[in-house]
Amino acid sequence: MRSLLALPLLAVALVACGDKSPDPSSETPDSTTAVAPEAKMPHVMGFEAGHALDSTGALIGGVTARFNTGDTIFVSVRTQYVAPGAKLEAVLMQGTTKVASDQGVVGDPNATTGVAILPVRFASSKPWPKGSYQIEILLDGISQGLKPLEIE
């Protein structure tokens, strides 16, 4: 009878001491494991409108969405991971009508951040009609966003 009681204990001990496969989450990568690089998708990080730009393309005097009929509208566009030479277009629209556009070519980005700033502007020889407008930025023909503005 004693041997019958020892049999289940022996079976439990064999299972507990059996060959275990390693937990993949606890393994540390070795030097032969390749790590995929982080994807660096080219994109427009953002853009703002204002009344003036400095020599680097950054706005002077702050961001605004309100302009007078005789103002030139300056836009500072920040891109990231965009190859130098890529085409960027800024379009000023009133409703669905294209009122003005300006094009530029992305320059060399900052080596550390991948950011490049491109200045664009909308100027008119006659006053802008009063009303609601939108600025749309296109990178290689693909819309990167819209921002509203008012001309009073």
Image (spheres, rainbow, N blue to C red):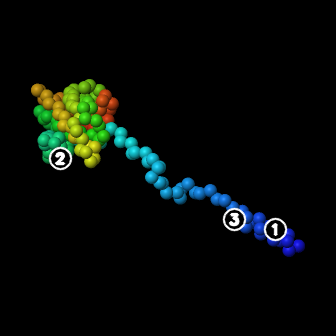
Q: Quadrant of residue 82?
A: top left
Query: Is residue 84 in sight in this rendering?
Result: yes
Q: Label 2, on which residue?
A: 62
**Which is more toward the observer, 49 or 83?**
83
In x, y percent, where is residue 67? 16, 38
Q: Label 3, on which residue?
A: 16
Q: Label 1, on which residue?
A: 7
Q: Compared with residue 143, is residue 1 higher up or lower down, i.e. above or below?
A: below
Q: Residue at x 21, y 29 (%)?
A: 103
Q: CA distance from mark 3 to mark 2?
A: 70 Å
Secondary structure type for disc 2: loop
Q: Compared with residue 16, is residue 115 higher up or lower down, i.e. above or below?
A: above
Mark 3 vs 1: CB contact within 8 A: no
The amino acid on which the numbered mark 2 sits, given as a three-letter code, is Gly
In x, y percent, where is residue 102? 20, 29
The amino acid on which the numbered mark 3 sits, given as a three-letter code, is Ala
Say which label, 1 or 2, has the lower sequence index. 1
Q: CA distance from mark 1 to mark 2?
A: 83 Å
**Image side of residue 92 versus residue 18, left or right:** left
**Which is more toward the observer, 121 or 6?**
6
